[in-house]
Amino acid sequence: MKLPMAKVAGVSLGILTAIGGFVDIGDLVTNAVVGSRFGLSLAWVVAVSVGGIAVFAHMSGKVTAVSGRATFEIIRERLGPRAALANLIGSTAMTLLTLMAEIGGVALGLQLLTGVMPVAFILPVALLLWLALWRVKFTVLENVAGLMGLLLFAFLVALFKLGPDWGELGRQIVQQTPATGEGPLTYAFYAVALFGAGMTPYEVFFFSSGAAEEKWGRRDLWLSRVNVSLGFPIGGMLAVSIAACAAVVMLPAGIGVSSLSQVVAPVGVAFGVAGLVVVLVGVLAATSGAALETALSCGYSIAQYAGWPWGKRLRPAQAPQFHAILLVVIILGCLVMLSGIDPVMVTEFSVVFSAVALPLTYFPILVVANDPQYLGDQTNGRVMNFFALIYLVIVMVAAVAAIPLMILTRMGA
Amino acid sequence: MPEGLPQHPAHDGRLIDANLHLLDRQLLDRDGRPILAIGDLRIERRDDGRHVVTQLLLGFGLTARFFGAHRPVSDADGVPWSSVTEVGSAITTNLARDDVPALWVERWWRDRVIAPIPGGRHDPG
Amino acid sequence: MRWRQRASEPPARGIEKVAASLLTIALLVGCGIAKDPLAVALGDGSSATASAAFALEHHSSGRLTGPTARTMLDDARRELSTAMEQVSALSASGDRADVQADALPLLARAVHDLHTAADRIGSAEADAAAARLRDDATALERLEKQAASLR
């Protein structure tokens, strides 16, 4: 019988995952760019990605809770070691790219608070992230990052303070065609980019491994449903409010968002310096949380594939290769970002390649969620399968279209 | 019982498919902690002509295959079938981690890399 | 399994050919629809200049912190000089060459005003500098629309 505190902690898992999934650096930048150039005419993409990730995160959480086995372990067994390895390499590469973007995002946030160049922060940020992964308990990481990330509600509150023309915003959402002079190709590119930003592949692995870290059992399936139906819609709402702030402040000013400073500026316009500081702290919390998540996802996937012991709940000495992976990915991310590469550019690439990598993650989850050997009587019902299959088609279309669109629009220029 | 298979003397045993239930599955130690993935089986021919599974071989030998070779298999690469206590979604054994020679890699990482870092042997948080 | 492979090869090759041709056609059509690089560069320039004006004004009115405003100005400076490089590197002809010829002095003026503005941040002349940048942005935006309509 679990104590109430454990249940509260369980809900935090959903909130952290939602925050990592919907307001990490990829979403912060992409939503603001879209809002400043398309208004809210792409809000429907956020809604679609909320539905998609809810379906797949719930499936993967269910798989772990019922079978007691971790996602990548099952993928290896169902697809065979060689196919699973190809899958592992593809999805780990994308997750690593996202980790680099998040480290860069933390550095950008610190630049906005202090005025110091972002590259100066890369090493200390990497060190702090690794220390958190080394010593801090999983639930503490979750709760702190999750709660502080809620400061990003400043975007939603700022939107109200800015007193926008709600009718106009509503019209943009419903019409889904931009009033500005953007072409259909650019529209399609940003739809795919926003989709990739929202349905990030690592989410699913993190959610299910996190469920194992928190020792979910069959009785905790309701927790998965609460997390999924609460956490992801909240995340989606925050994402749309970021776009809306850009639509209300940046679009009329003729400013196309291309840096983090322009993403947070609307909150400053609404609440002044105090509001700006609050939202920047929220940005730091969300991006560091996402950095931790992506690093952990790499560790989970690789260790589960190989069959090694894994998890933050074990002592490092009991899961040595898992912790070695965490150390290596942080070092790799740090080294790449130390080159001074523009974090926003890394973010843009990570978002597009996330869209490309989506089928690698979602297809195996769907296969496993229908396997009675692992799930017994808890396999997908017809309704769940129906939605899952529709999303699989959408995911495939996005994955195929992503790179051609990126090339044709020159990264959405 | 599937048709065409020879009768087995132990009628009350459980019929499992080696490919489906054993290969690529997770092997667990006696505390339920993961050891490694099962990559292969060693099957020996007894004197009476029957074939029995004697060992579960660990790892996929992908590193060796990547370089174009086949991994040489020795006794130390696996665990005896007799140590298996449960065949479910993962295979549980009654082994302690120190009894498994194939875990030398893990012990190397633990002793050379992780334990030297301060806090490596402590509980998290 | 060699016999199975041979049986499936001919139709598979056919499908591959169709897919490759469709993709090529799509890419060629797409290239036709893709945005004119002159218009894109002018758009970036106008956006950067407007962003710089925004930073100055809102810093004066106490809405943005010093570090944030300065970062916005630095980013704007970088974006504007990239835009200028791109416009000068274009090989345009006819009407587009006219637009390009108009664009270069405008961009140069915007760059100059941006440098001056960066020094004026936080001082009494910040608003005047912002107003000049705003004019530059509007002029660049007009040129962008002109370039976009030439197709």
Image (cartoon, coloured by chain):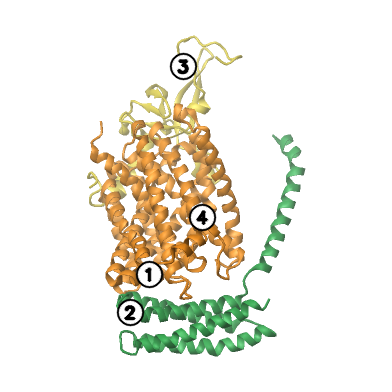
Chain colours: A orange, B yellow, C green
What secondary structure is marked by label 1?
Answer: helix
Query: Tag 1: residue type?
Result: Pro
Residue that badge 1 annotates = A266
Labels 3, 1: one chain: no
Could one spot residue A324 in this view of the protein? no
Residue B14 — which label? 3
The alpha-carbon separation of the residues under discs 4 and 2 comes to 34 Å
Asked whether disc 3 touches disc 4, contact meaning CB atoms under 8 Å apart, the reply is no
Q: Is A319 placed left or right of A96 in the picture? A: left
Query: Tag 2: residue type?
Result: His
**Which tag is nearer the camera, tag 3 or tag 1?**
1
What secondary structure is marked by label 4?
Answer: helix
Q: Nearer the viewer, residue B88 or A39?
A: A39
Residue that badge 2 annotates = C59
Query: Tag 4: residue type?
Result: Val
What secondary structure is marked by label 3?
Answer: loop
